[in-house]
Amino acid sequence: MLCTLALRRPTVQVGFFGPLVDRMVVSRPVLAPLVRMTAMNAFRRVRALEAESASNSAPYANRLKLIQELTAKCKLADLTYDGFLRTVFAGRRDLAAQAM
């Protein structure tokens, strides 16, 4: 049985990372190892590009950027300090009562 591939590339330009390419036709017995190799190569290529771009700036700038990304991703809501402590130390019953 033959399979036709449709590869999705990340938004950043990573170039060729094979062994599989878009619209390639491969047999089913070799599909799994080739997919694994392609995924590993793509991951390594993206990491190398990230490291290359990160080496062009100062380490503190990279840390600041990563911290800002993390806080933006994990931000809950606009809480005051008291509201934050209330959510941290409140029991499940207290949170259920506040939701009502």
Image: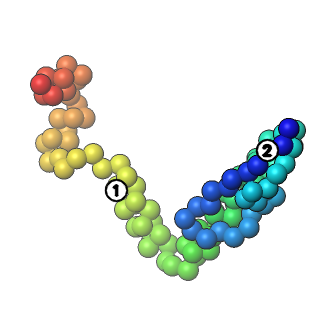
Q: Nearer the viewer, residue 24 or 88?
A: 24
Per the rendering, the mark at residue 3 is 2
Q: Residue furthest top?
A: 93
Residue drawn at x 19%, y 50% is 78
Give the amino acid at mark 2.
Cys
On the rendered image, what quadrant is the N terminus found in? top right
* Above or below for 87 versus 21: above
Residue at position x 24%, y 22% from top?
92
Q: Within 10 Å of the Cα at label 2, are there few (<14), some (14-19), or many (20+) other Cα atoms?
A: few
Q: Residue at x 19, y 26 (%)?
A: 95
Q: Position of residue 57 (x, y in %)?
A: 51, 79
Residue 38: give x, y in percent of width and height: 75, 54
Can you give x and y, in whole percent of width and height, for residue 64 in the image? 40, 67
Q: Residue 7 — which label?
A: none
Residue 15 in view of the camera: yes
Look at mark 1 in the image and give the residue it sits on. 72
Question: Is 75 on the left or on the right of 9, as rendered?
Answer: left
Identify the element where label 1 is drawn: helix
Foreground disc of the pair 2, 1:
2
